Image (tube, helix red, strand yellow):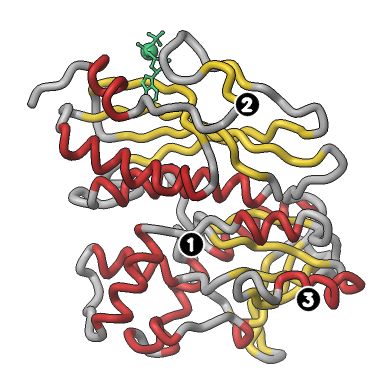
């Protein structure tokens, strides 16, 4: 079936409004949104490109889910609540089946967070999906990368590296010897869980936070640069998972853990005095592990016991 731009928007991206703060949604020249007086607006945008952020042939539903998930993750890292988003969709052909599945994947996640699509753009071109997201946060405090201080403990949620192993499995670069583990890790790549609830809890007790998208050490370096300090990472403290253990020898996991991207877990720092409170606060949320601490000297260094270890983990950089 051949679809025009108008048909695509009307059929797949126009839905009955579900939020009373959307005064005008999809269909006009722009959306009109009602801001609560006791909140700040938090805005972010992220683009995913076929062959760069996801392999050709990735299921449409997974592409739709992932395009929104990576954006929600940025809002989570600010300690905010995601509420509205716009979608710029560039695709080479108007394949009704593909668009329907893409929309279903995206809206399933949007509905889970009570978010609303309020506008966008639909163009012909290479498969590129850009989502701009808006969130709300209390006026008194939100999370940033820059609040870390020497002595603060460094924590990470989940198990970094699982998504990178999942991508290697999706790309048939790794032997899926254990099917259950292989499926679980591929889902970590295809359907990352944004850590909104964790970010909300950390808003009042973490000193700094950011989400892990480009790789643990790369993203920790960014947090350190913003906080004007460095970090020591204890390699023996890194979280491990049964799924990774069943597919990879312990030593071969480290490049994935330290350098792999796409996890969309939260990396955050906690002042020592706040540690007991944070441990209690996050206990029922998601697995979080202390992996090191911030230091004055502006380098990120890895240790095994007292021994410094040179790691070759290089995170993702589009232009390197
Ligand atoms: P304009 O030419 O004024 O930019 P368009 O014809 O591109 O308007 O879009 C018409 C309406 O449909 C606008 O409200 C726009 O925000 C919305 N829209 C277009 N593409 C999408 C999309 N992929 N998802 C959601 N809304 C969309
Ligand atoms: Mg337009």
Above or below 129: residue 265? below
Label 3 packing within 10 angstroms: few (<14), some (14-19), many (20+): few
Determine the image quadrant of residue 201.
bottom right
Camera-side residue: 20 or 245? 20
Query: Which of the marked residues, 2 or 3, is nearer the chain's N terminus?
Result: 2
- Disc 3 C-beta below 8 A from ligand 1: no
Camera-side residue: 53 or 98? 98
Q: CA distance from mark 2 to mark 1?
A: 31 Å
Q: Nearer the viewer, mark 2 or mark 3?
A: 2
Residue on which disc 3 sits = 280
Residue 160 image offset from top left, x and y in percent: 51, 70
Label 1 packing within 10 angstroms: few (<14), some (14-19), many (20+): many
Residue on which disc 1 sits = 263
Query: How many numbered discs sit on the rendered protein?
Result: 3
Camera-side residue: 295 or 68? 68
Q: Element at badge 1?
A: loop
Ligand 2, what quadrant? top left
Residue 21 is marked as 2
The residue lying furthest to the right in this view is 273
């Amino acid at each position: 079936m051949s679809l025009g731009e108008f048909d695509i928007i009307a059929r797949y991206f126009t839905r009955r409004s579900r939020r009373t703060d959307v005064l005008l949604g999809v269909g006009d020249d722009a959306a009109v949104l009602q801001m609560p007086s006791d909140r700040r607006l938090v805005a972010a945008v992220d683009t995913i490109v076929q062959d760069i952020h996801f392999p050709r042939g990735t299921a449409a539903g997974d592409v739709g889910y992932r395009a929104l998930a990576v954006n929600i993750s940025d809002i989570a890292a600010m300690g905010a609540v995601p509420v509205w988003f716009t979608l710029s969709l560039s695709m080479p052909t108007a394949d009704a089946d593909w668009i329907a599945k893409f929309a279903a994947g995206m809206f399933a996640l949007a509905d889970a967070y009570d978010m609303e699509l309020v506008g966008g753009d639909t163009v012909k071109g290479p498969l590129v999906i850009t989502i701009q997201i808006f969130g709300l946060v209390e006026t008194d405090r939100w999370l940033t990368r820059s609040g870390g201080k020497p002595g603060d403990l460094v924590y990470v949620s989940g198990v970094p590296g699982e998504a990178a192993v999942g991508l290697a499995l999706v790309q048939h670069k790794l032997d899926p010897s254990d099917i259950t583990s292989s499926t679980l890790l591929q889902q970590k790549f295809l359907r990352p869980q944004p850590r909104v609830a964790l970010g909300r809890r950390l808003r009042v007790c973490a000193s700094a936070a950011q989400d892990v998208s480009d790789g643990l050490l790369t993203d920790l370096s960014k947090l350190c640069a913003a906080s004007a300090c460095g970090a020591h990472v204890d390699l023996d403290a890194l979280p491990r998972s049964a799924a990774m253990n069943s597919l990879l020898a312990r030593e071969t996991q480290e490049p994935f853990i330290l350098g792999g991207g796409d996890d969309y877990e939260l990396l955050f720092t906690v002042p020592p005095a706040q540690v007991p409170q944070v441990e209690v606060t996050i206990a029922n949320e998601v697995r979080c592990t202390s992996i090191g601490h911030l230091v004055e000297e502006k380098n990120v260094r890895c240790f095994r016991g007292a021994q410094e270890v040179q790691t070759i983990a290089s995170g993702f950089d589009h232009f390197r």
